[in-house]
Amino acid sequence: MIHSLEDALFILDREGEVTLANAAAESLLPRLRQARGPGCSQCGNQLRRAGCHQRSGSYLECLADFDRLLEPCEVVLADRDFELRCSPLKDGQGDESERVFLLRDVTQKKQQLARQAHQERLSVIGEAAAVIVHELNNPLSAISMFSQMLLDELDAGSQGRGYAEVLVRNIRSCRQTLQALLELSTASSAEPGLFHVGDLASGVVELLRPMAAKDRTTLRWESELEGGLVYAAELPLRQALVNLVMNALQAAASRPGGEVVVRVLERGTEAVIQVRNNGAGIPPELRQRIFEPFFT
């Protein structure tokens, strides 16, 4: 029966010998013999106080020390997370002669919990974004209206009209940013449709060209597509590309001769959008967070 278990089950005696192991445990025992260090230090308060993580022994040697009380814990083996549970086996005199260990792979469970937490954060961000957009749109609408009235009253070619045009243009940019923020909070509900991915990419490049010019960064796009008609949700893709190109521009602006290239490629039946820049790379410690909303 134990050999049919998906969980790894094995028994250790006081000498640290494995007296029984099912098929799942057989594949994990070599890793337990080789693995050393911090993972074992997570095994219960008693084990932590005993300083097992400071010993030179392997996980398996650590588990075989019957002087330590093992509490339910988690260990990491080959980038997989396992829940470890231990139960004593007693001999005829009532002394603990062996220990039964059960290792359950909880990697998917932890990933699912992380995804749920991520979705909850997205929901909170969406609600906050809607409130922020509403509160900012009201005064911005008044500013926009009076700026347009001012623009209409000034003579064409005058310095004051030029200033007013800059004001109106930047107000429009602010409203577009607020709208993008609101759309980001509801992007999951975007309906898919047909559109030209090349047009989308070129539109994003043109949108951000003023930002590139301000930082003296070269921004260009290349296309190798003959058709480029795709069926997808255009809005979230456009938002993702805008964010990606903006990040690339910010990175490229950190050095002289900064350049960002947006390329649209065709690979079989797929259209691929590449964004490359010659700026500083993303630090390794930040790479796991790059897909979090508003993280930069």
Image (tube, grey):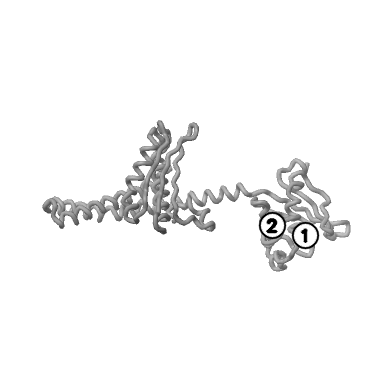
Q: Check disc 1: other Cα within 10 Å, few if <14, some if 14-19, many if 20+.
A: some
How far, Cα to Cα, is label 2 from label 1? 17 Å
Q: Is residue 221 above or below residue 129?
A: above
Q: Which residue is mark 1?
A: 61
Q: Residue at x 49, y 35 (%)?
A: 267
Q: Can residue 203 be seen from the camera position used here? A: yes
In this view, which residue lies farthest toward the front? Answer: 257
Residue 70 image position (x, y, % from top left): 73, 60
Taking 80 as reference, is 31 left or right?
right
Of 274 and 9, nearer the camera is: 274
Q: Is residue 177 above or below residue 53?
A: above
Per the image, the residue denoted by label 2 is 72
Q: Secondary structure at mark 1?
A: helix
**Quarter of the figure that contains the N terminus:** top right
- From the viewer's perspective, tell me whether residue 87 is left or right of residue 109: right
Q: Residue furthest right?
A: 92
Q: Are marks 2 and 1 in contact (CB under 8 Å)?
A: no
The quadrant of the picture occupied by the C terminus is bottom left
Q: Helix or strand or loop: what does disc 2 sit on?
A: loop
Quadrant of the image occupied by residue 71: bottom right
> Residue 264: where, in percent of width, then height?
42, 39
Question: Which mark, residue 137?
Answer: none
Q: Residues within 10 Å of mark 2 (few under 14, many from 20)?
A: few
Please state if 156 lies on the left or on the right of 72 as rendered: left
Is 235 in front, or is 118? Answer: 235
Inspect the image, locate mark 2, and give the three-letter code of the amino acid beneath it: Pro
Q: Which of the two discs, 2 and 1, sits closer to the camera? A: 1
Q: Nearer the viewer, residue 103 or 208?
A: 208
Q: Which residue lies at the image location 48% right of the left edge and 31% below the top edge?
A: 269
Q: Is residue 89 visible?
A: no
**Does 11 appear above or below 38?**
above
